[in-house]
Amino acid sequence: MLEVEEIHTYYGESHILQGVSLSVARGQVVALLGRNGMGKTTLIRSIIGFTPPRSGRVTFAGAEITRMSSDRIVGMGMALVPQGRRIFPSLTVLENLSVAARARTSQGWTLERVFALFPRLSERLTHRGNKLSGGEQQMLAIGRALMTNPALLLMDEPTEGLAPLLVREVGRALAELKAQGLSILLVEQSLPFALKVADHVNVLSRGRVVHSGSPTELWANEEVKSRYLGL
Amino acid sequence: MEFWVIQTFNGLSYGALLFLLASGLSLIFGVMRIVNLAHGSYFLLGGYVGLSVVWRTGSFALAMLAGGLAVALIGVGMERLFLRRLQKQELAQVLMTMGFALIFQDLALLIWGGDPYSIPTPAWLTGSLRAGELVFPRYRLFVIAVAAAIALVLWLFLERTRAGAVIRAAVDDEEMARGVGINVAAVSMGVFALGAFLAALGGVVGGGFIGVYPGSDFEILPYAFVVVIVGGLGSLEGAIVGSLLVGLLDNFGKALFPELSYFTLFAPMAVILALRPTGLFGRA
């Protein structure tokens, strides 16, 4: 479904991603772990087209998207739940969802389905984005991404700064989406959270994938855990 | 008393004219972050095109429409062919739009000559309304009504339609708007066309009371920028409040302290910027 091959991405002159390769198969949840500043968010930005890589290839659903504009990539069925949520502050909850809506298939996401996943949002319809709590913003960010009818969801630290109860809520939603067959590339700081939902795990350090394997393998690998994840 | 009422009225009508210019400038900046120094040229060209249409057809309504549409096309051409290539290059944008402004100025001089004109207004808009000792020119009432109607329509469009929400999303966070599948390039083109249309409409409407003459583009441009800076970039409420404030300040400044009129306009702007750097309705 998603193939990232040897990409190199720069911010100005700083060489952030130094030849990253990974793949996400249909229906798979792939976790991306690593300490802060190791290039996880840059990798997400490179895939969605915010910061295109200088070299290497990204293919999605059989087409090369390496230097395609983000809106076209989203139109092809990729969606983003960005770091920091980035809810549109002057839009209401309803508007945040409706600007992302893409009419496509009959089994696509609708407002009703998003509200069934996050009932909390339906009680906040006319609230502006900047009047929501952190947890509500996270639910809205996920709902907004779903409204584009994605086949692949990129999630950048969806549990960042959330209280344990809300982390569980996000975890429940994630498991539900996985059960419905959505492919997910998940960036996470919390190892237990990531290992619970992931089918495959990549560890990123200094712009390179330094470990790739199953969650159980990683859990057993004390060297990788202590060296790259600080555990 | 009379003095105050009449000066307030004059200030409001000039503010109404400024709103037509500033609302588009503010939206364009909000979505595209482009400082468009050619925005005053849209006002000038709109006025001249309107003048020619009134001369040919005698219809003021047609002049408003034709002036607006012709200049909207020019704006779209500028955006698609030139400004789109200069994203995030502020200096290049300033130079490019300044260049366009100078070219439009010369072009207008070449086509319409250097004489000042006034656009003939329909008979039903000439004359005045009287209330006791007070005299209100009908045409200025018309200008206020046009601006109020456009402010209302713009507000309904931006706040009550999906297309309006899409534009606000692009103003809030352009990158994230693309990240939810919004074609921001198409939105930018639409907003640019709308902004140019409104400025040109202002040119036609303004042609009926301040006239159409060489130099009116660079005369009104600083006012539009003051409105946008005071009101807050990308905010419709800011453009409304800013226009009225600047219209009133300018008018009272010129009436009460004619030798200090720039001071009375720019000093409050400096104070507002010092206290609220993002403008009255701007977001950080």
Image: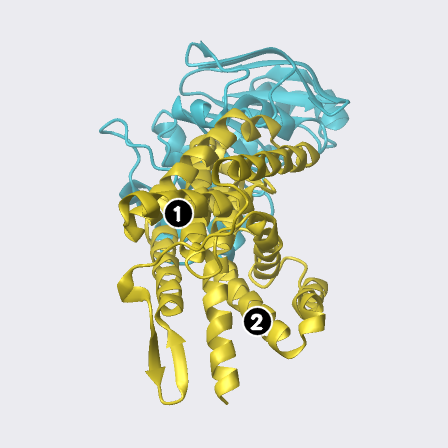
Q: Residue at x 34, y 42 (%)?
A: B66
Question: Which numbered disc flags the more N-terminal residue, 2 or 1?
Answer: 1
Residue B108 or residue B277, whichever sits in front: B108
Along the horizontal axis of the image, is B163 left or right of B202?
left
Q: Colour of chain A?
A: cyan
* Residue A139 on image: x %, y %: 45, 45
Looking at the rendered image, the quarter that the N terminus of chain A falls into is: top left
Residue holding disc 2: B251
Along the horizontal axis of the image, is A38 left or right of B14?
right
User: Can residue B34 be seen?
Assistant: yes
User: Can residue A138 be seen?
Assistant: no
| Label 1 Cα crowd, 10 Å radius (few <14 / some 14-19 / many 20+) | many
Name the secondary structure under disc 2. helix
Q: Furthest-left residue in view?
A: A106
* Residue A145 on image: x %, y %: 42, 36
Quote the CA–CA distance across marks 2 and 1: 26 Å
Q: Residue at x 44, y 44 (%)?
A: B48
Say which chain is yellow: B
* Residue B129 on image: x %, y %: 33, 78
Residue holding disc 1: B51
